[in-house]
């Protein structure tokens, strides 16, 4: 019985997966699930399972929302929420913000870092550029503006437009910033709904 309580604690408190627990107890996953059901433990959905695995197995840092905000930070929260309402991806499992305006991207990242308490190392970015632009120079530009190292830039996306046409769109291409965490996405979407109700 003592081992059963330990098993339940690993799943509910330590956030271990069924597979991880089965390895620790040198048993099969069916037996682990059987014990959890016996103790009326609710199983995680897919999103929760992925989040827990990122924390326990891959040791990815969780975001930490800032609880007490100054007046200036409240303004930053509203600004970041409004920016995401206009330019962010509302569905999926990640916070994804794309824009060609470097200052807009900078402000949104300040919102993620200051208000949402994200880990900078978990940010990933994709540069969208055009065939007559210098990809490396653009990456250097965006890395400096966002304070995101080049090692966190994923493969760039090349738009096949006519030469020079990007000048009417963006001199520096467009940057897509991604932070993979469905829970944070749900929170930002809830802030958007709150703002909409009060406007």
Image (cartoon, rainbow, N blue to C red):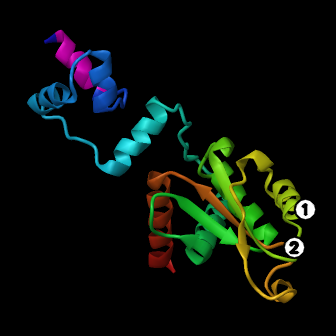
Q: Is residue 116 left or right of residue 164?
A: left
Residue 160: x and y in percent read 73, 81
In the rendered image, is residue 12 in sight? no
Task: Name above or below for residue 179 compared with residue 132.
Answer: above
Q: Residue at x 37, y 26 (%)?
A: 14
Q: Nearer the viewer, residue 176 or 88?
A: 176
* Crowdedness near tag 1: few (<14), some (14–19) or many (≥20) residues, C-alpha within 10 Å: few
Q: Nearer the viewer, residue 52 or 140?
A: 140
Residue 106 in magenta stretch: no
Q: Residue at x 86, y 64 (%)?
A: 138
Q: Quickly name the residue at label 1.
A: 137
Q: Quickly name the residue at label 2.
A: 133
Task: Name above or below for residue 187 compared with residue 64.
Answer: below
Residue 170: x and y in percent read 81, 80
Secondary element at tag 2:
loop
* Crowdedness near tag 2: few (<14), some (14–19) or many (≥20) residues, C-alpha within 10 Å: some
Q: Quadrant of residue 64?
A: top right
Task: Name above or below for residue 2 compared with residue 43.
Answer: above
- Give, as a single range, the part of the protein colored magenta: 2-10
- Quick one: which residue is furthest to the top in this view? 2
Q: Residue at x 80, y 50 (%)?
A: 147
Task: Name above or below for residue 168 compared with residue 50.
Answer: below
Residue 137: x and y in percent read 90, 62
Q: Is residue 50 left or right of residue 188?
A: left
Secondary element at tag 1:
helix
Residue 8 in magenta stretch: yes
> Do the numbered discs 1 and 2 sit on residues whose CB atoms are within 8 Å?
yes
The span from disc 1 to disc 2 (Cα, nearest Å) is 8 Å
Q: Residue at x 67, y 42 (%)?
A: 121
């Amino acid at each position: 019985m003592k081992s059963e309580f330990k098993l339940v604690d690993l799943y509910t408190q330590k956030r271990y997966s069924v597979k991880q627990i089965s390895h620790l107890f040198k048993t099969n996953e069916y037996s682990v699930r059987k014990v959890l059901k016996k103790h009326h433990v609710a199983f995680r959905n897919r999103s929760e399972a992925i989040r827990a695995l990122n924390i326990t197995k891959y040791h990815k840092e969780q975001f930490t929302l800032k609880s007490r905000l100054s007046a200036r930070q409240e303004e930053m929260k509203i600004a970041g929420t409004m920016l995401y309402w206009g330019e962010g991806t509302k569905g999926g499992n990640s916070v994804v913000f794309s824009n060609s305006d470097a200052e807009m991207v900078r402000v949104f990242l300040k919102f993620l870092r200051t208000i949402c308490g994200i880990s900078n190392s978990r940010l990933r970015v994709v540069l969208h550029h055009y065939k007559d632009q210098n990809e490396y120079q653009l990456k250097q530009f965006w890395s400096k503006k966002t304070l995101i190292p080049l090692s966190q830039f994923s493969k760039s996306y090349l738009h096949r437009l006519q030469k020079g046409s990007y000048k009417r769109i963006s001199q520096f291409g467009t940057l897509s910033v991604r932070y993979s965490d469905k829970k944070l996405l749900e929170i930002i979407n809830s802030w958007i709904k709150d703002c909409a109700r009060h406007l």
